[in-house]
Amino acid sequence: MTLYPSNEPVKRGYNAPRREAQANQTRHAILEAAMELFNDQGFTKTTVSQVAEKAEVSEQTVYNVFGDKVGLLYAAGMNAIETGAGDPEIDLIEALGGEPDPMERIRLAARATKEIWAGGAFELEQMVFSPDVRDPRLIELSEKALKHTLESTRTMVEILFPDSLRRSGLDLDDIAVVFTAIDTAATVSKLIKLGWTLDDYENWLVQFLVLFLDPDQI
């Protein structure tokens, strides 16, 4: 044992909690950047380099954490499903719950649905739900996303069509399934190709949803 100071560098203790917190923070920043870019410009046009730049990390860090761009899409989609982060349906449910007028609730639902598509959801959904997808990660993501959408829609139609206002003989689960099946990127894209605008789609949704209301109660 020596009383003289050593020239050797002092070894610092390994702080696992701090490292883990930093890793989670980095992962969160990358996912946020990816979802913003995917929504703004689509999956195809977004590059890993752009995600890294926006998240203020190296491109290699993105690859180290997520493997590739499909892995990034999978992780971002799963994060959105599991946390509800950035989910416009959450805001919609809150708005519907605070609106007493049944017709205005339907207009709010139709308007919010249009705004989701206007926000650039087409390419992302088409990528995830494409029948040509071979990547098992996206197959799993598409199945979970569909289940999540159905659950959110079920919550929405429960507010729109309570027993006291719903047309006799109609089941809430059936309404939710039909609405989920209709309101897809494939359907809306086809309507636009046939000459409709998103405003036309919104107006049609209002007329469609009104059919589920008991006409004697509105």
Image (cartoon, helix red, strand yellow):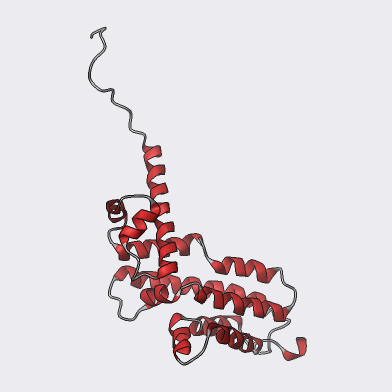
* Outermost bottom residue: 194
Side of 101 where 32 appears, left or right: left
Relative to 43, does residue 65 appear above or below in the rendering? Answer: above
Expressed as whole percent of the image width and height from the top left, the position of residue 116 reads 52, 73
Expressed as whole percent of the image width and height from the top left, the position of residue 14 reads 33, 33
Residue at the image point whose x is 36% and y is 54% from the top: 53
Report the quarter where the C terminus lies. bottom right
Report the quarter where the N terminus lies. top left
Expressed as whole percent of the image width and height from the top left, the position of residue 204 reads 59, 88
Side of 108 where 78 appears, left or right: left
158 or 40: which is nearer to us?
Answer: 40
Label tally: 0
Residue at the image point whose x is 23% and y is 17% from the top: 7
Side of 191 where 49 appears, left or right: left
198 or 28: which is nearer to us?
Answer: 198
Residue at the image point whose x is 34% and y is 61% from the top: 72
Indicate the quadrant where residue 158 lies.
bottom right
Indicate the quadrant where residue 128 lies.
bottom left
Residue at the image point whose x is 47% and y is 65% from the top: 81
Relative to 58, does residue 176 appear above or below in the rendering? Answer: below
Side of 217 where 65 appears, left or right: left
Expressed as whole percent of the image width and height from the top left, the position of residue 6 reads 24, 15
171 or 74: which is nearer to us?
Answer: 74
Relative to 56, does residue 206 appear above or below in the rendering? Answer: below
* Outermost top residue: 3
